[in-house]
Image (cartoon, helix red, strand yellow):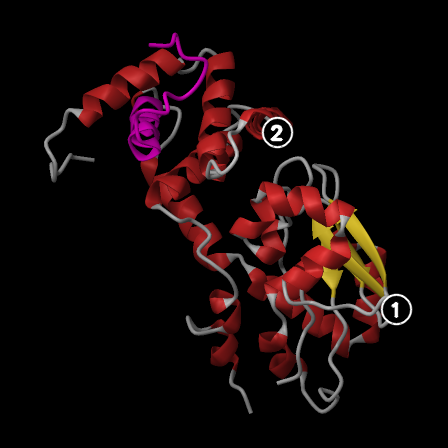
Amino acid sequence: MTTTSGPDETLPAALRTEALEQLLTERGLIDPKMIDGIITTYETNVGPLNGAKVVARAWTDPEYRRRLLEDGTAAIKELGFGGFQGEHIVVVENTPTTHNVVVCTLCSCYPWPVLGLPPGWYKDPAYRARVVKEPRAVLSEMGLDLDDDVQITVRDSTSEVRWLVLPERPAGTEHLTEQELVPLVTRDAMVGVAKVAAP
Amino acid sequence: MSAPLDIEGPAAPPRSNGEFVFAEPWESRAFGMVVGLYEAGAFTWPEFQAALIARIAAWEALAAPGKPYSYYQLWLAALEDVLAGLRAVSPEEVTARTRALAQRPAGHDHPH
């Protein structure tokens, strides 16, 4: 038996979470209904779709694109997205010769208001450690093969800066409207581990 | 022509773009508790983040090879660390309550 310095791993985390929620509720520190609301918000109301709308606007409106690259947080707020974990978002642009990929080496900092919550692989120790050391190999394993002459920049997120990648607009989409472009933009492209494909 | 509904509806590509955010319901509760307590001013975000980074770093330093990584287990541990530091809830209290819950008969519908 330990005099526990943390959760007792012999008991399931689900039970421990439930116990903690009960104690916090009894002490008036949380309200389970409020927690329900928070979960609903993050599961359904924020997510990659917000980021996709930002990207599609930037692809079709050069003025907006300029503002977005200049002050990401303010330009994203123009479309009504912002708030917790989105206080300071910096947008970096991928081009045919330069490629940005985002990581959080220490934990899992991620721009929630535009991308929702981070996927499993983003939080995984292997991705966090390896993408810094060998980005080309990691991207290739994830299905993105970049030519050797493409310069890769790894952007490490912190509590001060959250990165959002503005992917390249795919060739052959010149005739599409902003609304038609939105569904093409994937979360992986906005983290920089994929490119956007033409439909 | 795609209607706006195509991108707003449940079948919109971003929703099929990747895996589930929460693998199990308890993970979403652990997540919601942290955000809720933060929003209520129980702690600052950097305080929680420092606890989370410390837990992740400790796991990475000590984990046996092949041991599965559970991000939300570390998230929960970080929350407990912060609450213990605030003297709001002690780990012993959580353990005692967890043991009590473990005694419930299977399928027991507990009131909320």
Q: Position of residue A40 (x, y in %)?
A: 41, 52
Picture disc at residue A85: none
Q: Residue at x 49, y 19 (%)?
A: B81
Q: Position of residue A87 (x, y in %)?
A: 69, 44
> Could you classify mark 1 by the number of other residues whose Cα lies within 10 Å: few (under 14), some (14-19), or many (20 or more)?
few
Q: CA distance from mark 1 to mark 2?
A: 34 Å
Q: Residue at x 51, y 85 (%)?
A: B3
Q: Position of residue A129 (x, y in %)?
A: 68, 41
Magenta residue span: A1-25
Location of residue B20 (image quadrant): bottom left
Under mark 2, the amino acid is Ile
Answer whether residue A65 is visible to the viewer in this image: yes
Q: Which residue is mark 1?
A: A97
Which quadrant: the C terminus of chain B? Answer: top left
Question: Viewer-proximal residue, A136 or A110?
Answer: A136
Q: Residue at x 57, y 44 (%)?
A: A124
Under mark 1, the amino acid is Thr
Q: Is residue A6 found inside the magenta-colored segment of the image?
A: yes
Question: Viewer-proximal residue, A131 or A63?
Answer: A131
Q: Is residue B78 found inside the magenta-colored segment of the image?
A: no
Q: Which residue is mark 2?
A: B53
- Mark 2 belongs to which subunit? B
> Could you classify mark 2 by the number of other residues whose Cα lies within 10 Å: few (under 14), some (14-19), or many (20 or more)?
some
- Mark 1 belongs to which subunit? A
Above/below status of A142 relative to A155: below
Q: Position of residue B97 (x, y in %)?
A: 26, 19
Left or right of A190? Residue A146 is right
Give the farthest residue toward the front: B65
Q: Residue at x 40, y 24 (%)?
A: A29
Above/below status of A190 relative to A12: below
Answer whether residue A192 is visible to the viewer in this image: no
Give the farthest residue toward the top: A3
